[in-house]
Amino acid sequence: VPATDSLQVPPPPRVPASALRLRRRFRRFLAAELAGTTAFDRAASWDGFDPDFSRRMGAAGYIGLSLPRAFGGHGRPLLERYIVFEEALVAGAPVGCHWFADRQSGPLIARYGSEAQKAAILPRLCRGELCFCIGMSEPGAGSDLAALRTEARPVAGGFIANGTKLWTTNAHRADYMIALMRTTPRDAAAGRHAGFSQFLVDLRSAGIGIRPVRDLHGREHFNEVTFTDCFLPADAVIGKAGDGWAQVTAELALERSGPERYLSCHVLLTELLRVLRGARDTRARVALGRAVAELVTLRTLSLGVAAQLAAGEDPQLTAAVVKDLGARFEQSLPALAQELVAVQPTLDAHADDFRRVLGSLMLVVPSFSLRGGSVEVLRGIIARGLGLRSGEESRDG
Ligand SMILES: Cc1cc2nc3c(=O)[nH]c(=O)nc-3n(C[C@H](O)[C@H](O)[C@H](O)COP(=O)(O)OP(=O)(O)OC[C@H]3O[C@@H](n4cnc5c(N)ncnc54)[C@H](O)[C@@H]3O)c2cc1C
């Protein structure tokens, strides 16, 4: 095993007083907003979709926290953004309408977008008025993203797009997609990662079809999106045409490292603590203590990644570790709940909250080790980062 020091996660940063004040203020905002909701409502977390809530969050100054002031953002440190994301998830706020925009599309546009794109998009995004979706995966191109076949062929004034995106969360209710497409044909000499570009796609454009795909839960939140001779103007390219692969890799680090990778099931943990409060069962106490200790460890690791991002470092490796460990932790929670509390999980609207939260999350957690990069692929990235593996890189590794 070659010696390596590449998995050095910086110690978690000290949370500054300004962030603690922000946390208190945001908690008050959330408490007022979520008064009267059930644990079942809150368990939807970042899958919860409420455009009015997103607008109120934007109006109160909690979206685009780290984006530039010149474009409607708040210019605050990344750590404050982390605190807001964390509090929203712990509370189970319905952040789904603006989540992708705030987490990755806004920062991507701020970093690579043209001045015109920033002026047109960022102020509305920060007001919570825009919903974005992520157009990466395709049939036959999930883990191996570089195998994608949607092409945007250069024509006078822009590009003509043809192809299919798959598993596109919220495409049916989004305003824009950030899509990765091939703009020059694959060329063995240039390598399989050359020739991609990212586009800011207005989903009202002619030639776009959106068909829902129903999940295990019976919900329709992701979609198949087809492009049929869809014209994309030249100014829809984000960054530089041909640089799409480097940009999308940077975007994936934002997608993978945040608190949503270990707090998506948090309501189940708090429900378990509520149901078992006062129980004298030592086994339950030990198991819950272990779960909370694991949560605290994951948070420390994830805050370390936030510090790497803030320092301008590339956290690809550590983000993969957080995502892998976080998914495993979250997937273990429904089984732990069943082991400690003998109830039947259900989706029956008349059943008690705990059983409904359990029923709902049991159907959702299998996706945690797929969305944002599958477990096997993440472990490949980790192995490569530790110097244990070489070979060609796939989507996520
Ligand atoms: C709830 C949910 C929401 C999603 N939302 C979006 C979205 O909004 N936008 C978007 O672009 N995508 C989205 N995705 C797609 C997600 O990114 C892909 O599911 C993921 O990248 C895996 O790709 P795949 O489904 O094609 O599986 P595949 O790549 O076909 O993989 C299938 C299995 O084979 C394994 N495998 C594949 N390659 C290797 C390898 N080289 N070595 C070892 N094992 C391997 C994988 O680990 C996996 O277990 C979403 C997925 C889910 C579940």
Image (cartoon, rainbow, N blue to C red):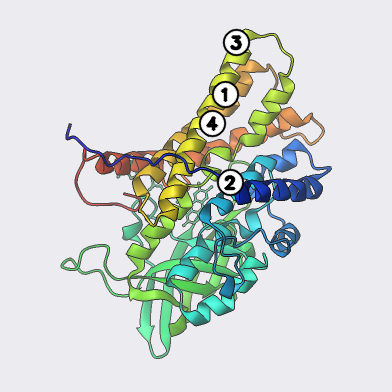
Disc number placed over residue 335 in the picture, else none? 1
- Structural distance between the alpha carbons of marks 1 and 2: 21 Å
- Category of crowding for the residue at label 3, using alpha-carbon neighbours closer than 10 angstroms: few (below 14), some (14–19), many (at least 20): few
Q: Which one is earlier in the sequence, the residue at label 4 or at label 2?
A: 2
Density class for disc 2 (Cα within 10 Å; few <14, some 14-19, many ≥20) is: some
Q: Which residue is mark 2?
A: 215
Q: Amino acid at mark 4?
A: Leu
Helix, strand or loop under label 4:
helix
Q: Is mark 2 within 8 Å of ligand 1?
A: yes
Q: Label 3's element?
A: helix
Q: Residue 287 location, x and y as percent?
A: 57, 17
Residue type beneath disc 2: Asp
Where does residue 183 sit, x and y in percent of width and height? 34, 75
Q: CA distance from mark 3 to mark 2?
A: 35 Å
- When asked about the image quadrant of residue 345, the answer is top right
Q: Which mark is residue 295?
A: 4
The residue located at (58%, 46%) in the rendering is 215
Residue type at mark 1: give it.
Ala
Judged by depth in the image, the label closer to the viewer, 1 or 2, is: 1
